[in-house]
Amino acid sequence: MVPRWIICVTVVGIWISSCKSSNSAQTAVKTFQNNTVILPCHVESLGVQTIVRWWREDTLLADSSDPNLIHLPRIKMWDNMSLEVSQVQPQDSGKYVCQASRPAPWGHVTQVQTIEVLYPPSIHSVPEAGELEVNFGDEVEMACIAKGVPYPSISWRMKDEEMKLLDERSKLRFRADNRTLSGRYTCVADNGIGEPAMANIDLRIRYKPEIESKKSWIHASPGIRAQLDCKVTAYPDAKVDWFIENERITYSSRIVKFIAGQVHSLVIRNVRPSDYGYYVCRATNDLGVSETSIELSGIANAAVFKESNPIATNAYNFIWEVDSYIPIIEYQFWFRKHSTADRGRDWHKLFIPSGSDAIGPLHGKSFNLTGLTAATHYEALILSRNRYGWSKPSKILRFATEGAARKDHYKVEAAYEGSPLAVVMNDSPTPRSETLNSASIVNTRDSTLNIVLVVFLLSISLEQLL
């Protein structure tokens, strides 16, 4: 028979028998906030005086020998030595010890129980204000501190989209090297109890102004209304001013500045020839200055080829349009054989009267080019002249007479007056460029044109007479 004094039994709660001084295994109680928890403490009656005390950490909560010793109104020890904790709160979580004391030779026996109060997550941001400003290029550091039982997991969202992070983290650290990183960052704490908790941090990146304009050149004729636009983005907001030829513009009822969101506009009513020139949109804030230039001019817009069709084995028809509020006086039709081997060949230039005094704004022209070589690739461009001068060149058009192999892989860049006329081809690793000069265009007549080209001009003149 096993001696009685070495028998210890642990049930739900605590069973304290006649063991010598010992500590029994710890048990845990998980409960929700505001519930009531009863921690049993069963003590075997041995006919000797037994004192039962309940401890939490180092604080004595209840003593069977002193019924008046109750520190908290929510704690009560019943006659059966059970401890009741009502309306449990997160701060009630911890270890509770039931200690039974008897005179020698029995001594003390104890058992530990743990209360774990489960409660929904809470979270707050660092910085607590939820706002963070840094300069472009600086390091950004933000964090969220979460609470809850069990401890919540933390995830992040940026502008309502989940951030793909390599691991779970409460802190974000990165460099503000892109202004699109500005915006709202949201940290979400979730522990499966109740609803997830969220905190927001609004990041603003300070950067110097950025300017863009859809048009760097605007055509306008005297008497009409012209509008120059530039889009400015900056933080903090930029101060925007307009200049012409390095002089700040004096605004009036005729020259007015408008702002619509990020778009800053300069409106010139009843344009005068003296208004032509280079305008500068300049934006300034604490971090720097940016600007863009827009030219206001009376010359025509660059011509646009609308159609090009073969009409014979050695002839082509071209149709183009020009946007100009002022009548077109004449056109220049430039053409040459296309060759990837020699990009420095001279252009053949035909001067074609417009044949119209129409004000516009759209001017159309059809022209037949004959006397071409069969099975040959060519390229062509158009310039237009009104009373303010020659326009910028059109984009280069590539065409081929009957029998030539097709080349669909050309890539063409626009050519502009006074700047390199660049023709870039996928099969030419080292493209060359030529420069079109306004003075040479006006004064040059190509003496090398053959009789066929002279016939072209005569045929045009006859068409006008008829």
Image (cartoon, rainbow, N blue to C red):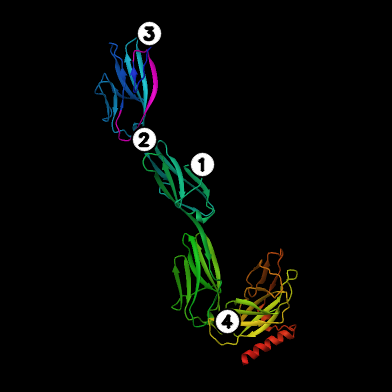
Q: Are marks 2 and 4 in contact (CB under 8 Å)?
A: no
Q: Earlier in the sequence, mark 2 or mark 4?
A: 2
Q: Estimate how packed mark 2 is, as few (under 14), some (14 to 19) or many (20 or more) residues with alpha carbons within 10 Å.
A: many
- In the rendered image, which quarter is residue 154 located in? top left
Magenta span: 17-37
- In the rendered image, which quarter is residue 386 located in? bottom right
Q: Nearer the viewer, mark 2 or mark 4?
A: 4
Q: Which residue is mark 1?
A: 167
Residue 278 within the segment the image draws in magenta: no
What type is the residue that disc 1 sits on?
Answer: Asp
What type is the residue that disc 3 sits on?
Answer: Pro
Residue 35 within the segment the image draws in magenta: yes
Q: Earlier in the sequence, mark 2 or mark 1?
A: 2
* Residue positioned 32% across, 17% down in the render: 100
Which disc is residue 112 wearing? none
Residue 251 in the image: x percent, y percent? Answer: 46, 75
Residue 265 in the image: x percent, y percent? Answer: 48, 71
* SS state under label 3: loop
Q: Which residue is mark 3?
A: 3
Task: Tell me the CA gap for discs 1 and 3.
Answer: 57 Å
Which disc is residue 364 wearing? 4
Image position of 326 (left or right of 334):
left
- In the rendered image, which quarter is residue 421 located in? bottom right
Which disc is residue 118 wearing? 2
Q: Is residue 94 above or below residue 396?
A: above
Q: Are marks 2 and 1 in contact (CB under 8 Å)?
A: no
